[in-house]
Image: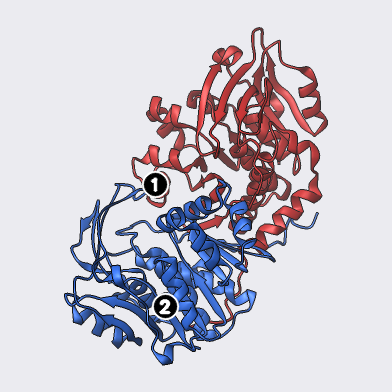
Chain colours: A blue, B red
Amino acid sequence: MGLLVVGSIALDSVETPFGSTTDALGGSATFFAYAAAFFHPVQVVGVVGDDFPSAELDRLAERGVDLSGVEHARGASFRWKGRYSADFQNRETLDTQLGVFATFEPKLPEAFRRAKLVFLGNIDPTLQSNVLDQTETPDLVVCDTMNYWIQGAPELLLELMKRIDVLMVNDSEARQLSGDWNVYRSARWILDRGPKMVIIKQGEYGAFMVDETGVFCVPGYPLEEICDPTGAGDAFAGGFMGHLGRTGDLSPANMRRAMVFGSTTGSFAVERFSVERFLEIGPAEIAARARAFADLVHFDTTNGFDE
Amino acid sequence: MGLLVVGSIALDSVETPFGSTTDALGGSATFFAYAAAFFHPVQVVGVVGDDFPSAELDRLAERGVDLSGVEHARGASFRWKGRYSADFQNRETLDTQLGVFATFEPKLPEAFRRAKLVFLGNIDPTLQSNVLDQTETPDLVVCDTMNYWIQGAPELLLELMKRIDVLMVNDSEARQLSGDWNVYRSARWILDRGPKMVIIKQGEYGAFMVDETGVFCVPGYPLEEICDPTGAGDAFAGGFMGHLGRTGDLSPANMRRAMVFGSTTGSFAVERFSVERFLEIGPAEIAARARAFADLVHFDTTNGFDE
């Protein structure tokens, strides 16, 4: 079951209360691929400039990530620079240099076109749509977006929403998209416009999934130390879709498990800068934390629930 | 198993985007009692002025609430006036008139002193301490507080914390108390100062409980309509302790169930102004929503969790 992601491959410079990075590996496709590769091979579509460190690409390839869809363009790689507030509640973008990303036109290698699971990372909805045009018959298309496109290209997003299965956004994006402060009404607003399912991420508070059958919630994993929230949402998406890829099961019960694995990889992502945490852990750590989510929410209905 | 609450019995005037109330029934002891009375008889300690509508007290009494600890003092009842922002994320206090509450000295009737479950609602920590002095051997003492006391009487609170079993506060209060932005570290900071357990409420995001065995999370119930968040935390406490009262079981597993019943009564409280929602529902509605929480978080660990 081919698992495809299109998104940014970037060099991030991040300032947090606990330190900073310069030109560290980042980007939505990168975080996605690192997280998903614990579960299933990943096919990446993206672009890097001629200044991109090849060692980083080699390291991804060693993890089972197929980079044959990554274009090597002349020019500078995409760079993002940002700063987090002391409590991580606010993020300020200090600089964005699109570089080769400005003229990026995704081209899917032949082998990628038959991918059954497709993640459209947060890029221009025109490019997301182009990628969809190049796929054959995916079983599940999941799409992310952000305030920049919601404000700047709402019509394109609405068109795209008719073609996707799952919209995966954070709560402020869902509110902005629907124009409604209530996240559950916002989710319904989105469901009325195409997607069969909405996944809304709420940072430290966790995430929830809404479809016609109801709502499923996963709490945020209780972390006493957070180093850098960058990439958490894409790492969430990677764990979510990686689990679907390895199991080949799109049943509602398995979508719930995928939410838990997404929460797991998302929680690991924030424990270090860049993708560093993913270099320290393996499937055992991921399975252990995923199981910990079960205890985190478990209660039995033996006493008092049967009035 | 006697269940005692001390707290305010107030007349609230609330403005929300969806309407307003004037001198509606409010106060921490009131919301607590309404919620807890679905589960177990409640003993209330508090004070009302001679302007307090006796019909409201009669209605509480009809629900199995023992008001023999409510002092009738000469003067005006405690009044609070507040306004919520359009998205309910911010609350502004417009006016507070302490009235008879200014000179309130809680006096426990003889029968109340043997209460096994005690909830110290959000009042002056000196009064909370006085109430504790008058109890004999409670099995569980749960205490709420707020920013006003955290800022104004931190030493008193720290003394009180040595005498209670559970501190139940919201996340901003926990952060303020510990001086740490991370809520899980804040919880540990609190556990190091006396309480065996900390319950941290996070509004629409739910609540979690921390003790030496770990963390338990309950999501916020997905509500598409919210009318008035006033009293949600006290209604949470009422459901939590009411369930403990009716079951007489303070085991860790039952504390988790109590968290679910607290979340249930808290979620009902916000659906109408004042205590209005509690007049519309009964044990069947409460049990049904509590069971819905089980589905809201349930996933099975059959596939992918055993790497």
Q: Which residue is mark 2?
A: A5
What x and y, as percent, mark residue A233?
42, 64
| Left or right relative to B32: residue B173 | left
What x and y, as percent, mark residue B56?
77, 23
Say what amino acid the circle numbered 1 marks.
Answer: Ser
Residue at the location (63% across, 62% down)? A191
Q: Which residue is mark 1?
A: B186
What x and y, as percent, mark residue A167?
53, 66
Say what amino acid the circle numbered 2 marks.
Answer: Val
What x and y, as percent, mark residue A134?
46, 83
Write down the quadrant of residue A271 in the picture.
bottom left
| Left or right relative to B49: residue A164 | left
Residue at the location (74% across, 25% down)? B67
Q: Is residue A103 above or below residue B143?
A: below
Report the number of numbered marks.
2
Of badges 1 and 2, the one in the foreground is 2
Nearer to me, A176 or B65: A176
The answer to whether residue B41 of the structure is visible from this angle is no
Residue at the location (45% across, 58% down)? A153
